[in-house]
Image (spheres, helix red, strand yellow):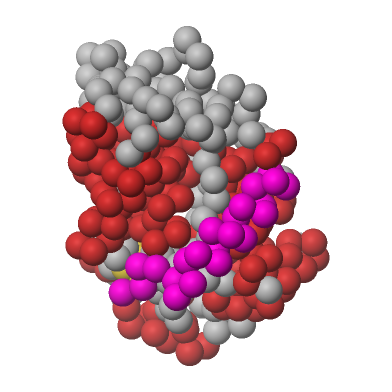
Amino acid sequence: MHLMDQKPASRIIFSLVCLLILSPLIHSQLDYSFYDTSCPSLTRIVRNGVWSAMRNETRMAASLLRLHFHDCFVDGCDASLLLDDSNDIISEKSASPNRNSVRGYEVIDSIKADVEKACPSTVSCADIVTIAAREAVFLSGGPYWFVALGRRDGTTANRTAANEQLPSPLDDLTTITAKFAAKGLDAKDVVVLSGAHTIGFAQCFTFKNRLFNFNSSGGPDLELDVSLLKNLQSLCPNNVSSDSNLAPLDPVTTSRFDNIYYKNLMNSSGLLQSDQALLDDSDTASMVSNYSIYPYLFFRDFGASMLKMANIGVLTGGNGEIRTNCRAVN
C-alpha cells in the first residue's frame, strides 16, 4: 500500500513555492494560522486519523476526497453532507449521488472526537473534512497544499440541490462544465479535479452502459480500449446483480495518487464516460495530454483547484456554528 511518496519533503517544498502563487485565491476571512493557538495539534490529529483509516482500507483515501467534493458542491463547504435526518433536517446523504455511494462518515466522526478531546468546541467539521481530503491525497503519494482555515458548519442540508447540482458519471462534458461554472470553477478545474480519479473505485452501474448498450447502440462504446472492455465485461456482467461490483478508476496504480489517470485517457482507458469525455474538446484534451506527460504540472494545478473548491460558499465569522457532533446541529 502506497501511503507516502519516497520524497515527501520535496512535495512540501514544492507546495511552499506554489503557496506564494496561490495565496490571492484564498477567501479573505480564512487564515492559514487560524488554529495555531486554539488547536495547534489539529493537523497531526487529522493526519493520524486519515493514516489509520487508510491502513485499514486503502480505498478510504479516495472516499474522503470524494466526500469533500460532494460537500462543497452543495451550498458550499459547510459540512452539510454530514448531517443525519432529523425533525428539521432532510439529509443530503439520501440524495441519489450520495446514497450507498459516499463513504467516510465514520472516519470523520472518529477524527472529530479526537479533535474535541484536544480542543473542545473549537474546530469545525467543515475544516476537518477539508484537511482530511488534503491528507488523504498526500498520504497516497500526491501533492501537499496549504489550507486556509476558519470555515464554520452549516445548520441546514439541501437534498434537492444534491440531486440536481452534483456532476454525474453519465454527464457529457458540456453539462459537467456548466455545473462546475455554477460553482465558480472553470474548464481547467474540471480537467484537474477529474484527476482525483487516479485513486479509488467505481460501482459497475456507473459505467455499465459503456459495456453492452452504449447510447442504445446495442453494443459497447467503441472508444473504450478492447482489452479493458473485456476485463470490465467479465467484472460487470450484464445483469442487475453486478451493479455494485467495484472496478478501479485507475487499474495501473490503483491506490497511488499520480498522473497515470491521464495516460489512461490518452490510451482510451478511462473508466467513466465523464472521464473519457475530456478528450471530446480540443482545449480539455490538450490539458489531458500535458498532465499525462508532466506529473508535477498536474500536482501543482491540483493543489490550486482544490483550494478554489475548498472556498466555495464558506461560512465564516458569525455565520454557521462549530458543531460538537458532525451529524447534528448544536
Q: Which residues are magenta?
A: 1-22
Identify whether 148 is placed above or below 201.
above
Q: Is residue 85 magenta?
A: no
The quadrant holding residue 17 is bottom right
Q: Is residue 3 visible?
A: yes
Residue drawn at x 80%, y 65% as measured from the top left: 282
Identify whether 201 is placed above or below 320.
below
Give the x, y percent position of residue 166: 51, 41
Q: Is residue 261 visible?
A: no
Count the numbered circles shown: 0
Identify whether 295 is placed above or below 71.
below
Give the x, y percent position of residue 120: 25, 23
Q: Is residue 6 magenta?
A: yes
Residue drawn at x 71%, y 53% as measured from the top left: 188
Image quadrant containing the C terminus: top left
Q: Residue furthest top?
A: 318
Give the x, y percent position of residue 7: 49, 72
Q: Residue furthest right?
A: 282
The quadrant holding residue 270 is bottom right
Residue drawn at x 32%, y 78% as measured from the top left: 235
Identify whether 107 is placed above or below 57.
above
The quadrant holding residue 195 is bottom right
Give the x, y percent position of residue 66: 42, 50
Magenta stretch, main secondary structure, is: helix
Q: Residue furthest bottom?
A: 227
Foreground residue, 288 or 122?
A: 122
Q: Is residue 292 toward the left or the right of residue 77 in the image?
A: right
Residue drawn at x 40%, y 27% as measured from the top left: 37
Q: Is residue 171 toward the left or the right of residue 63 in the image?
A: right
Q: Is residue 253 toward the left or the right of residue 238 in the image?
A: right
Image quadrant containing the N terminus: bottom left
